[in-house]
Image (cartoon, helix red, strand yellow):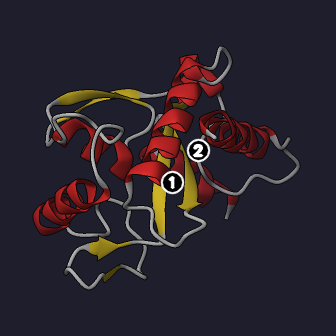
Amino acid sequence: VFDARDTIEDEFSSSIFTTFLIVEDREGDMLRSEPLQVLLTGETELRTDPEIGPTLFTYFDTDELVEIVGVQSIAGLIDRRLPNGVAGSTDTEVKQVAAQLIDERGPSEIGLSAQLTTNADGLPVAPAVLVPVLSDDSILGFGGGGVRLGTDTAPEEYSRDVLEIIRQGETQYQ
């Protein structure tokens, strides 16, 4: 079993350590300007944090034709498509762009919850979104994602730090 585990990790290991965050809106709809602004603030805080920022994985998103540093969420996707960004747009404008993204990519690819519905105007309503945070494991040194017996809790502590920084964005926005 241990030999098989080691072979799998050697052959299929990734240099990316992913932390998944589920972000919910207290009012039940993340696809509004205000909660997306909060999420964008948290993402900026994450990227500029002196400890976490340098560990984030950078890649080029070929769909959006933009370089992504660590985190790509529905907030960033919508923000880039609105002429005035999320902050300068109405909830209806935000929802219209979200609907376009859903049509283009599908709800799961852009991280929308399975509880996605539509409002009376036929525009999307999502109580939560999934936000993957990608970190460079060659910097972190956590190794493959397999089960490790008797190791430290560094990956879990790192993920808690990421979550705390995103939460700070919410506090600073309010």
SS of the residue under disc 2? loop
Residue 108 location in percent, x, y? 32, 69
Name the residue: 27% across, 36% down.
85
Going by the numbered disc 1, the residue's amino acid type is Ile
Residue 111 higher or lower than 35, as above or below: below
Q: Give the side of residue 53 with respect to residue 122, left or right.
A: right
Judge the density around disc 2: few (<14), some (14-19), many (≥20) Cα neighbours within 10 Å: some
Numbered disc in front, either 1 or 2: 2
For the residues labelled 1 and 2, say whether their Cβ atoms are less than 8 Å apart. Answer: yes
Residue 29 location in percent, x, y? 45, 68
Q: Is residue 133 visible?
A: yes
Name the residue beneath numbered marker 1: 8
Count of number-bearing discs: 2
SS of the residue under disc 1? helix
Q: Give the side of residue 137 with respect to residue 90, left or right.
A: right
Q: Quadrant of the C terminus?
A: top right
Name the residue: 26% across, 54% down.
94
Q: Which mark is residue 118?
A: none
Name the residue beneath numbered marker 2: 144
Going by the numbered disc 2, the residue's amino acid type is Gly
Residue 170 higher or lower than 51, as above or below: below
Residue 28 location in percent, x, y? 51, 73
Residue 121 higher or lower than 174, as above or below: below
Q: Is residue 10 visible?
A: no
Name the residue: 66% across, 38% down.
162
Q: Give the side of residue 157 with respect to residue 72, left or right.
A: right
In terms of depth relative to the viewer, which is nearer, 16 or 26? 26
